[in-house]
Image (cartoon, helix red, strand yellow):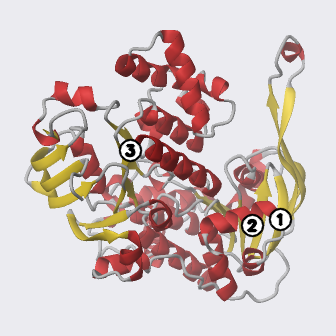
């Protein structure tokens, strides 16, 4: 590369006496896409933040030369805050990983995008507002004018991520730092965003530094890849070469972390969960004066039927808004519904007190263990809470022994973590927190676990570990799983049966490998092609 747009030399980032980025070198040419790959804690996000002076409390060393066509090279590490402020958004922009924390909750999405355009491009208020709507439309968001007037909490995770992308691309920067830009998006939307980024990159010769742990994303999007481990770049080169002939052991480990199918066939048995013609309606306000007197309704789930036998996994797959999470809430007895749900020989009672015994049989593991575990409770209190509710007569010592045994069953012991029971969730990694969440669900010995995107927030290697754990626990305890996900690879790895949902309806169902290998519905084919699992499904 004769004159790269960005050239980092011996880039080092430290927090106090701890060095987290250790003298790395990389470069990005105009119009090039470089992927920075590694697990959580490898230093890839801190690297991107340090380029814009956004790594608070960090001390940096080395160089990061930015060569813009109309100016002399600038060392980003040597610029003042005022000089960096002039570059941020206009020449170098960033898509942050968690849009809910990056977006201002007090201003509408349109106002936040318009503010960038007014400050950086000098547009009038009216011009900036219309440009903000256009930016949202380019990301494929539905009803961009209405979404522009919405606040962050009123959008889904995928919509918030697209709003963040629209804000970053508003001023058409020369360099885009994209930190997990498609993590919250469904597979089809990931394709749309990648296509959008590629189109803008080609139009404006925009360079992209993609930070991700999604290897499929790297394969489809990037030109070159740099692999980071513990603050160092251990391997780099063209994507095709690194993926086909990895030289470093860590790169080989990442590439080998794709979910593999390890489920065993369950013995035939009557279904434990049966749902017939389940529908869920939400009340919505209708437009105009009529809405004041008679609300409308939205059909979120339309006559869905399913069954799950002991020791079996039913995977429910679909994009955001397909109704899969609403269906799960109905099956958990947490959402009013029409139709019939039988758990064993019982159904949910209209009286909350009447459901206590049944709730012990049905537990849930949520998507994000960091938000689903109370930060004010110790591990002993979190895991033992269910025992206190369902077995109030159990003595404290017996409860503690049960908690320790359940934690050991999910791979957490006092030998590994001294003082385990008195620790708090923030003292554990993401994968360890998810194991605690699984232990919390298992401690009351349920029949059915509802798994709501149980691995989407985890790195690929940790994801594989958690999936293997769930498969082992199912085999040992003959658990039934209702697996809610938009990740077709997870369905391929874990599910016995699969049910595909779109717009509240079940469009296809059947044995998982059969459906993935030979999808009959166009929507299922699109999901399988986007996830690149057709070959694996056929082989399985």
| Circle nearer the viewer, 1 or 3 | 3
Task: Report which residue position mark 1 lands on.
Answer: 521
Q: Quadrant of residue 367?
A: bottom right
Residue for badge 3 = 206
Q: Is residue 45 above or below residue 143?
A: below
Q: Residues within 10 Å of mark 1 (few under 14, many from 20)?
A: few
Q: Residues within 10 Å of mark 2 (few under 14, many from 20)?
A: some
Q: CA distance from mark 2 to mark 3?
A: 32 Å
Using the rendered view, name the quadrant where residue 159 is placed: top right
Q: x%, y% of residue 304?
A: 86, 57
- Mark 1 touching mark 3, by CB under 8 A? no
Whether the residues at callouts 1 and 2 have beta carbons within 8 Å, the answer is yes
- Image quarter of the N terminus: bottom left
**Which of the marked residues, 2 or 3, is nearer the chain's N terminus?**
3
Nearest to viewer (mark 2 / mark 3): 3
Q: Give the SS element for disc 3.
A: loop
Question: Do the numbered discs 2 and 3 sit on residues whose CB atoms are within 8 Å?
Answer: no
- Front residue of this view, candidates 218 and 319: 218
Label 2, on which residue?
525
Counting from the top left corner in percent of width and height, residue 540 is at 66, 87
- Secondary element type, mark 1: loop
């Amino acid at each position: 590369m004769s004159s790269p747009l960005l050239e980092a030399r011996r880039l080092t980032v430290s927090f106090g006496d701890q060095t987290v980025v250790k003298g790395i070198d990389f470069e990005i040419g105009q119009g090039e896409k470089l992927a920075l790959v590694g697990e959580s804690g490898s230093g890839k996000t801190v690297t991107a933040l340090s380029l814009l002076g956004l790594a608070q409390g960090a001390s940096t060393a080395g160089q990061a030369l930015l060569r813009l066509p109309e100016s002399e090279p600038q060392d980003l590490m040597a610029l003042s805050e005022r000089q960096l402020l002039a570059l941020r958004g206009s020449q170098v922009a960033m898509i942050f990983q968690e849009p809910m924390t990056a977006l201002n909750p007090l201003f509408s999405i349109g106002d936040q995008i318009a503010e960038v355009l007014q400050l950086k491009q000098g547009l009038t208020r009216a011009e900036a507002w219309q440009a903000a709507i256009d930016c949202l439309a380019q990301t494929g968001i539905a009803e961009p004018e209405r979404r522009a007037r919405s606040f962050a909490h009123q959008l889904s995770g995928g919509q918030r991520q697209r709003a963040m992308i629209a804000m970053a691309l508003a001023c058409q920067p020369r360099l885009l730092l994209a930190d997990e830009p498609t993590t919250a998006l469904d597979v089809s939307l990931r394709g749309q965003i990648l296509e959008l980024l590629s189109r803008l990159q080609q139009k404006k010769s925009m360079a992209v530094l993609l930070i991700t742990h999604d290897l499929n994303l790297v394969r489809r999007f990037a030109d070159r890849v740099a692999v980071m481990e513990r603050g160092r770049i251990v391997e780099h080169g063209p994507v095709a070469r690194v993926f086909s002939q990895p030289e470093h052991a860590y790169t080989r480990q990442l590439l080998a972390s794709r979910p593999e199918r390890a489920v065993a066939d369950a013995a035939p048995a009557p279904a434990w969960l049966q749902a017939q013609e389940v529908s869920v309606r939400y009340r919505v306000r209708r437009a105009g004066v009529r809405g004041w007197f008679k609300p409308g309704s939205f059909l979120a789930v339309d006559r869905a039927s399913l069954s799950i036998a002991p020791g079996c996994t039913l995977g429910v797959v679909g994009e955001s808004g397909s109704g899969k999470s609403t269906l799960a809430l109905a099956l958990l007895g947490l959402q009013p519904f029409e139709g019939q749900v039988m758990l064993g020989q019982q159904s949910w009672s209209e009286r909350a007190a009447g459901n206590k015994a049944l709730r012990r049989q049905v537990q849930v593991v949520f998507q994000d263990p960091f938000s689903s575990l109370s930060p004010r409770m110790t591990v002993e209190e979190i895991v033992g809470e269910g025992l206190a509710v369902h077995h109030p007569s159990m003595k404290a010592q017996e409860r503690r022994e049960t908690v320790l045994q359940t934690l050991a069953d999910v791979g957490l012991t006092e030998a590994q973590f001294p003082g385990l029971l008195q620790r708090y969730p923030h003292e554990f990694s993401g994968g360890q927190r998810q194991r605690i969440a699984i232990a919390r669900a298992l401690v009351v010995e349920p029949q059915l676990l509802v798994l709501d995107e149980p691995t989407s927030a985890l790195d690929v290697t940790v994801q594989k570990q958690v999936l293997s754990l769930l498969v082992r626990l199912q085999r040992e305890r003959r658990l039934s799983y209702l697996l809610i996900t938009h990740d077709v690879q997870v369905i391929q790895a874990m599910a016995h049966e699969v049910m595909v949902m779109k717009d509240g309806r079940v469009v296809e169902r059947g044995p998982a490998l059969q459906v993935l290998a030979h999808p009959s519905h166009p929507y299922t084919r699109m999901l399988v092609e986007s996830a690149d699992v057709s070959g694996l499904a056929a082989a399985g």
